[in-house]
Amino acid sequence: METCILEPTKKNILKAVEVLNSNGVIGMPTETVYGLAAVGYDSKAVKKIFEIKGRPADNPLIAHVHKDFDLSLLVHIENSYAYSLIKSFMPGPLTLVFKSKGVVCKEAVAGGDTLAIRMPMHKDCQNLLKEINKPLVAPSANLSKHTSPVTAMHVKNDLDGKISIILDGGKCSGGIESTVLDVTGPVPRILRAGLITKEMIESVVGACEIAMHKEGDKVKSPGVKYTHYKPKCDTALFTEDNLEELVKVYNNYVENGKTPYVMCKNSVAKKLGNLNFLLLGETEEEVAFNLYDSLLLGEKKADVILAVAMPNEKGVNMGIMNRLKKSCGVV
Ligand code: AMP
Ligand code: MG
């Protein structure tokens, strides 16, 4: 199968809808990362997503809907605080987990009784969702375990020949996956950190918990237990107060004929002098925007990426550090 990257014109959106309505799977842009989408009611198409990615069948998918979609068609909204979150953050990079009504197929929810829903903010994605007027279930459009794609070309690099269409919506403005928030209990619980932060959620609904995973626990959000976001080269993670060690390791690689790259914020690079760099920018938003692009560029240029951790895990840094630790195999 030839994989075409298509501009998101009206004609090409109709083409994508035709593929989706014929048990097909496509690559679609969102403001977080690119998704690998199928109609959520269609078991046959949803099974293809798991096959194409090599995704474990027990890892459920997020259903993406347009901004005027009636969520009560898909889920029970049991807690009134969920309405405040919907009003404040949807459309946007927030996924809410509700009790499912069972209309989205069981393969998509990995046989569970909850459904995760998101309304993407990306214009072309909204146009596609509006046109098809059905929930599109979509994980990130990469091979399982690999770094998530933030351009149409990243999707093609991973899935060439496996899907017919990738709609090109440009580089994703957010850069890391949505915050996943369980709203089935009395207090919302973050299952995966992202661009909608704990602090932002608290400012709307007062309280917000973070799901902790201890060994032996039944995992609430199965995706968090798998190897994730790994580039194809070696990786190592250093703290900002251990740059001497980083330089030692860097020089060791060079002496052994290898090409190391340091991935860090611009201000950290300034302290390090003349090395190979993958620069992440400075603000939390810039770092999120550049993170996967840098890892995917790094795997092409480097034998090893030596990454420098963020100074804390507050705000957006919580989501960034979650991805960074996993991509460096630290957790
Ligand atoms: P991905 O699509 O690769 O960004 O992964 C989606 C994330 O959302 C994974 O961590 C899933 O485990 C999580 N997720 C999706 N649906 C549910 C659900 N119904 N309950 C809890 N977590 C979910
Ligand atoms: Mg993913």
Image (cartoon, rainbow, N blue to C red):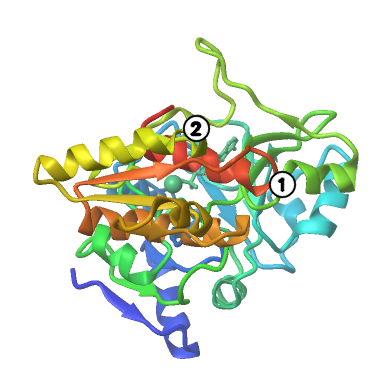
Tell me if I can see residue 180 in this picture: yes
Q: CA distance from mark 2 to mark 1?
A: 17 Å
At x 50%, y 39%, the residue is 240
User: Residue flagged by tag 1: what amino acid is it?
Assistant: Thr
Residue position marked by numbered label 2 in the rendering:
224
* Label whose residue precedes the other's in the sequence (2 or 1): 1
Q: Where is residue 264 drawn, in percent x and y? A: 45, 51
Q: Is mark 2 within 8 Å of ligand 1?
A: yes
> 66 or 265, which lies in front?
265
Q: Could you say where residue 223 lies in the image, as x and y percent from the top left?
A: 48, 35
Say whether marks 2 and 1 touch (CB < 8 Å): no
- Answer yes or no: is residue 109 visible: no
Q: Could you say whether the residue bearing mark 2 is in a helix, strand or loop? A: helix
Badge 1: residue crowd in 10 Å (few <14, some 14–19, many ≥20): many
In what element is the residue under mark 1? loop
Mark 1 = which residue? 197
Residue 211: image quadrant is top right
